[in-house]
Image (cartoon, coloured by chain):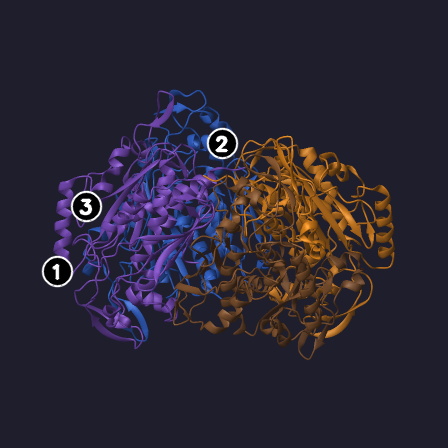
Chain colours: A orange, B brown, C blue, D purple
């Protein structure tokens, strides 16, 4: 099973880039939640392509059609199915590539995995377009969580050597988290955003691409949510985050950096803030033993540079097994990390709905 | 469910640090596999404490008792249950801490999660001791995989600023991977190992601890194993790796570094090595689209410094909610990353058994 | 999660009776299977309503639209999503019932379960219409199984006191199993079918309904498939069969009858038929210890009479909590067991795909 | 996976009849539940063999050793592992049978399933002895449910033509349900029990065995628990009940009988009992659309006659594939249905804990 996620709050993604459409079935959504369709569409619009030159020129409105599970945008409690039709497909761009494996892409591994039967047009089920269903589901989850006082936000922390201001691990506010939702480019610091755009545009003009890091944070979570061992916050989040195409790393709090630290530096001292237990630093990213501390949940996700680039590359034809060269045509984002920002927020929201669902026992 | 992992090849861990024992039930192990008990015990001995000053002085032999699922060390196909008795417990060390939350540890979050009913002696179910069951299961899996030509090895890549030689992402051999299995300290480069020991001993004498990075690699995997979206190699590995106490980050191939790269640098060109498709670099860590390329599977895991340190720290008493200070007593590893090396190998072996099990469809 | 089934071969049903449509997502279908669309549509037509007076006069063609996972009716290996649009809905029939609980129906329990937010038009997600997605999935599975030499068939064994000829538990042939696929009424014995029609028509004219028993059989299964305890053939089949609305009992082989037998009567003696192990009787229904014997798999499913009847019944208004009477309007099958026949075949086919998927271990 | 059950409240059974022991791991048990060990042992004693001639003369005390998850019989919230050692094993009884397939038993199917590697002594993992772990888990669950006002009871409804008084589907009381817990033979009507004992003893003396039906009921369940489609009360109960060796049928409420009824007979009219919605009959067994009505949950389970009988039977040697005859030696219950009564209660209790766990959403 590649495309189902969750045990208590389940999503099932489907669709190929150039098929009829992509979509999602959400199971075990609580009944009676009023969803704001404008807010949902705004969230999906952040993932939609074609807004500027940092993303693919493929323009699609990504309007979801809800087939089941809601009446007048109120959840019924039964499975929600949403379909986003594919309207703007240029399959001819993929003719040449039908047998030349794009380096860094899943063309070759998908061919072996599915014995050549998978739909390769536009990357098929490996396409980032499949994240439209993820973002629909995540948008619904964000609204469910917001009603519980939980706010999720993400931003582009780094692109090809340029860094945005990081979230304050202790004092980040919901307002800061919501900043990127209304920005044309998902950074906290507008100047950093401008520098990133320059890097991305430089890569684009050079028929190349760049990678990035997305930092995500959730505030408003109670302490005591999650579990030790395999159902911890980190396990569940990473297992869904690596489902976003191009993600190659996930770290929580200080993450890899803390490998160079002493325990006395890394440990977050507890203190009482009135009647609430808090920590004065938050190197653990809001998670100890797989369970929330009540401090901001903070993690970073590394995204590799878009693999589809126009530059000539060495590769092989996976049908004839002959070596060849390839310049990838088609419309591709020069930096997938930009549109990955709402995807990371969506994955976080879905994972938190799962974790909160499982937090209630008998 | 905190302590079950896997869908096709399932493990269920149990036990507390100072209870009767810890252990594991493994379900869906193939029938008829001959397990070499000496090799299994040697593997478990790598995790066992008390060997030198880099680990806790708690000495336990960690001899597993197999209650079911094997006859004369041949798997029956039915569930295998193994129990490792707890023999050397000093619960009195934990008296003071019974209500002072160790900074960086799960004392406080566990208290909230289990409303104070969890067994806190020795960290209870949050203790690294629970990994004895994980390592038993991983040792069985390593032998199953070895019969299929798959070799797994890991080493301490970094400890508090000191780096070991990294695995060659393209040309690493099974021999290199097996090096640490027979070393007294798990590095490839003995000199780097000595420097790490110095760092760890320095921290220990200073009542402090240090973090580290474990690099792990598997060779011999066929191409085409895994799935896109949520059942990919990266999703499954990270979801089990974050179950090892103290893990705060997981990255594959170039990982976070590739966020600063261009696509043309990061993409791994394909070429034909005789009749085999290979890549001339391996920045993707052997995984594209969640599916193996057939090149070495390569990932790194960040471990925070041991949270239990003797240095005085500010904290709170989680019963009275009063602020206090704490010097942690008890026997603790000054660097959990050392004994985490076999745990990472074990988690990798279990995950690969799951992935290979699910690779067979109808 | 109400509407997902399966661990290795997963289906996720969605839809409400009077919403946009109903459908299914199938995950982990093997790649490269050629599906015959005519055969699939014929199978779905057996479930479709409106064919004669034994079923609801609601006429719908039930044409599935495949959104993903197939190209030219060849499976891609990626998730298949099929949607069957709702075209012929009379929601006004349900006005009166909006608050009067139909006795025997899920109106009241659904109201409590979903706090009144579920879509009640046409029974919503509780409607037998949701089985259209089940039958699509089952139709695909039947074709997958047929390519492996496995044939599934079912018939109406009993309706309101009238019995059809039972399948021969030992010597039933694929030809017999396929008989009902081409009949206008799903019995083996046409005369029995006529008598059942009479009973059903009598009930219909009397504003009443009747129950029935569906007998189902699969031949061609190898011995040794399934597992002891909870992943046995009986566990998996019953867990999906009870998902068909109105099912109240499931029994295998001699079933409840064997409770009155001696062991020496019930045990099926083994013998050698050339080089094949067979049993001379088949009271176990082809399953011992949860595992197939290689003999025909045989089970029966009891369906209660349609709960929606025109006769006046005592009930309560579940909003005002006042007692009232109700004559159910709307278009309802006077005997759900008739159209349940292909549903039972579909459920059997899906369960067998799951079982065969899980039969392959490492 | 054969031996794990549950999604939110999980059990993992292990053990073979003549191995070291049998047992269970329970995951996601709520923290802080005080378990009465005497009550638990009394419940387990009802399953233990050797009490009189209706069961196997193999005498074992079945004392569970709790390895984890409880302190002073209070649940910690972490996994509970209990082991019941095997102390009284006569493996020599199984020498002859090592290659003669017992008709009606899983010897042959287990041999094929596990390629001959399974432990066949005493039936191995197929032995009813494995239900000791199920009954331990069920005993814990019964106590958890009792604290919520839910009472479960079962009795032998029928043995070889003799019937006990059935539970009153509408008015059954907790007191009636608890009757069999303190009886030496599990019937409501002592006279019926005596007649059953006569039938069982007659079969035993004749080297034969008899089947039976166990009726089980739970009262105190709230309305609105469960789900439509695949996570309904009937689906979950049947999926665990068929895990009890020898179970061949499960039916709810009127079950198979309602197939002969009219809707107007079968539908249960709703009425108001003060402020509570009730039904005046309970043919649905307390479940509509997979969801509880709040009336008693009522179901019956058919158990085939013990397959291991002393009478000479025709069979085959599954290694040499030669036909032979077999008189089964060893100590076997002449009627497994007797000791299945607490097993059915245990399965019901575990299933209800799962259902109640999943009833809490976000």
What chain letter is assigned to the residue under label 1? D
**Residue sitting at the far bottom:** B274
Instruction: Estimate how packed mark 1 is, as few (under 14), some (14 to 19) or many (20 or more) residues with alpha carbons within 10 Å.
Output: few
Q: Mark 3: which secondary structure?
A: loop
Q: Label 2, on which residue?
A: C120
Front one among C39 and A227:
A227
Could you say which is closer to the camera, residue B205 or residue D214? B205
Q: What is the x, y in percent for residue C208?
A: 33, 32
Q: Nearer the viewer, mark 1 or mark 2?
A: 1
Residue B6 appears anywhere in the view: no
Tell me the distance, in whole angstroms, between the alpha carbons under discs 3 and 1: 21 Å
Q: Which residue is mark 1?
A: D206
Q: From the viewer's perspective, is A232 left or right of C2? A: right
Spatial distance from mark 1 to mark 2, Cα to Cα?
A: 58 Å
Task: Give the camera-side residue of C224 and D339.
Answer: D339
Determine whether label 3 and label 1 are within 8 Å by CB: no
Provide the residue designation for mark 3. D185
Label 2 CA crowd tier, 10 Å (few <14, some 14–19, many 20+): many
Of A205 and D342, which appears nearest the observer? D342
Q: Is residue B126 left or right of residue B267?
A: left
Q: Secondary structure at mark 1?
A: loop
Question: From the image, which quarter does the C terminus of chain A lie in?
Answer: top left
């Amino acid at each position: 099973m590649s495309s189902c996620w969750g045990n208590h709050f389940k999503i099932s993604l489907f669709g190929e880039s150039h098929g009829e459409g992509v979509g999602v079935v959400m199971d075990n959504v609580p009944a009676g939640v009023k969803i704001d369709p404008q807010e949902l569409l705004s969230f999906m619009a952040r993932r939609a392509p074609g807004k500027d030159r940092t993303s693919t020129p493929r323009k699609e409105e990504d309007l979801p059609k809800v087939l089941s599970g809601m009446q007048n945008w109120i959840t019924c409690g039964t499975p929600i199915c949403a379909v986003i039709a594919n309207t703007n497909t240029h399959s001819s761009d993929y003719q040449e590539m039908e047998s030349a494996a794009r380096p860094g892409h899943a063309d070759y591994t998908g061919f072996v995995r599915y014995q050549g039967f998978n739909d390769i047009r536009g990357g098929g089920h490996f396409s980032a377009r499949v994240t439209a269903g993820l973002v629909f589901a995540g948008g619904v989850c964000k609204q469910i969580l917001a009603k519980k006082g939980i706010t999720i936000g993400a931003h582009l922390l780094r692109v090809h050597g340029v860094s945005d201001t990081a979230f304050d691990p202790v004092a980040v506010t919901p307002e800061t988290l919501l900043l990127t939702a209304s920005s044309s480019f998902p950074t906290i610091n507008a100047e950093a955003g401008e520098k990133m755009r320059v890097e991305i545009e430089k890569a684009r003009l050079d028929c190349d691409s760049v990678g990035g890091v997305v930092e995500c944070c959730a505030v408003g979570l109670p302490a005591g949510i999650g579990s030790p061992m395999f159902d911890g916050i980190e396990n569940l989040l990473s297992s869904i985050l690596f489902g976003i195409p191009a993600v190659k790393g996930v770290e929580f709090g200080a993450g890899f950096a803390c490998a160079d630290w002493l325990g006395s530096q890394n440990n977050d001292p507890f203190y009482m803030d009135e009647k609430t237990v808090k920590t004065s630093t938050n190197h653990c990213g809001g998670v100890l033993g797989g369970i929330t501390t009540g401090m901001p949940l903070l993690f970073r996700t590394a995204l590799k540079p878009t693999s589809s680039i126009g530059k000539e590359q060495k590769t092989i034809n996976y049908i004839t097994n002959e070596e060849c060269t390839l310049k990838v045509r088609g419309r591709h984002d020069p930096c997938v990390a930009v549109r990955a920002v709402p995807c990371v927020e969506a994955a976080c929201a879905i994972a938190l709905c799962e974790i909160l669902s499982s937090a209630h026992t008998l």
